[in-house]
């Protein structure tokens, strides 16, 4: 996996498969504490004890016609390589939260990547799911909540090309903005 936004896409796909109607994605860049943190939480069906016990095994999956389940093991491995760790909070019927952190300035830490495209792919392909994206970089923060956008749009679908373009521009503008502030 080339960058963290692709890992996020993978973890969010698990939430979709778990029947989530709301998926929260949080990315936190704390350069003072030298930590980069990602969190994906959902209100899907959650994992039972057996699943939780096996989920870090790359040969465990509940997907049909598949012999490997790599999403969580690969992300856990990426974190471990950067003095970080992955934790899972879940329970049957209680949703799932995957939290992972990395040493921010670790030489092997993958870049965040194109988080805008990851979000657009999710929003456009699953318009009925509410996505909440929060990004924090030190004291700055950005919040996107598709439930709020849908309310404002009325009958216009959230995945119509014009709306998708506006959301994408909004995310990109914010990311460029804070990048400039940091330099
Ligand atoms: N958010 C979640 N809610 C409920 N179950 C989950 C969730 N995330 C993972 N799981 C369970 O853990 C298993 C392993 O997940 P993982 O992402 O590692 O592999 P996978 O999704 O099965 O396959 P891959 O990611 O390689 O396509 C899943 O098959 C599923 O049973
Ligand atoms: Mg997966």
Image: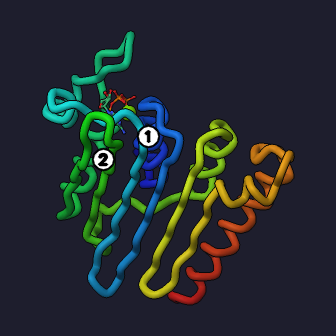
Real-space CA distance between mark 1 and mark 2, rounded to the nearest whole angstrom: 9 Å
Describe the element under mark 2 as helix, strand or loop: helix
Query: In the image, 7: left or right of 98?
Result: right
Residue at the disc numbered 1: 10
Residue most toward the top?
A: 65
Residue shown at 37% from the left, 60% from the top: 38
Residue 100, placed above or below residue 60: below
**Quarter of the render that holds ligand 2:** top left
Question: Residue 53 appears at what percent x and percent y?
Answer: 13, 33
Describe the element under mark 1 as helix, strand or loop: helix
- Residue 75 got which mark? 2
Q: Are marks 1 and 2 in contact (CB under 8 Å)?
A: yes
Residue 92, placed above or below residue 117: above
Q: Is mark 1 within 8 Å of ligand 2?
A: yes
- In the image, 150 versus 105, the foreground residue is 150
- Residue 97 got which mark? none
Q: Quadrant of residue 66?
A: top left
Question: Residue 21 appears at what percent x and percent y?
Answer: 53, 40
């Amino acid at each position: 996996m080339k960058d963290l936004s692709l890992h996020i896409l993978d973890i969010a796909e698990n939430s979709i498969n778990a029947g989530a109607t709301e998926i929260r994605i949080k990315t936190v860049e704390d350069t003072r504490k030298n930590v980069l943190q990602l969190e994906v939480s959902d209100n899907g069906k959650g994992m039972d004890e057996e699943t939780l016990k096996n989920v870090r095994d790359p040969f465990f999956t509940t997907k049909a016609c598949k012999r490997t389940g790599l999403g969580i093991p690969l992300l856990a491995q990426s974190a471990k390589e950067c003095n970080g760790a992955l934790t899972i909070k879940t329970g049957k019927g209680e949703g799932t939260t995957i939290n992972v952190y990395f040493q921010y300035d670790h030489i092997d830490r993958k870049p965040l990547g194109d988080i805008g495209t990851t979000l657009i792919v999710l929003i456009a392909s699953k318009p009925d799911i509410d996505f909440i994206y929060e990004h924090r970089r030190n004291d700055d923060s950005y919040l996107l909540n598709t439930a709020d956008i849908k309310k404002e749009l009325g009958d216009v679908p959230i995945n119509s090309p014009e709306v998708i373009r506006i959301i994408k521009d909004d995310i990109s503008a914010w990311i460029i903005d804070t990048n400039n502030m940091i330099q």
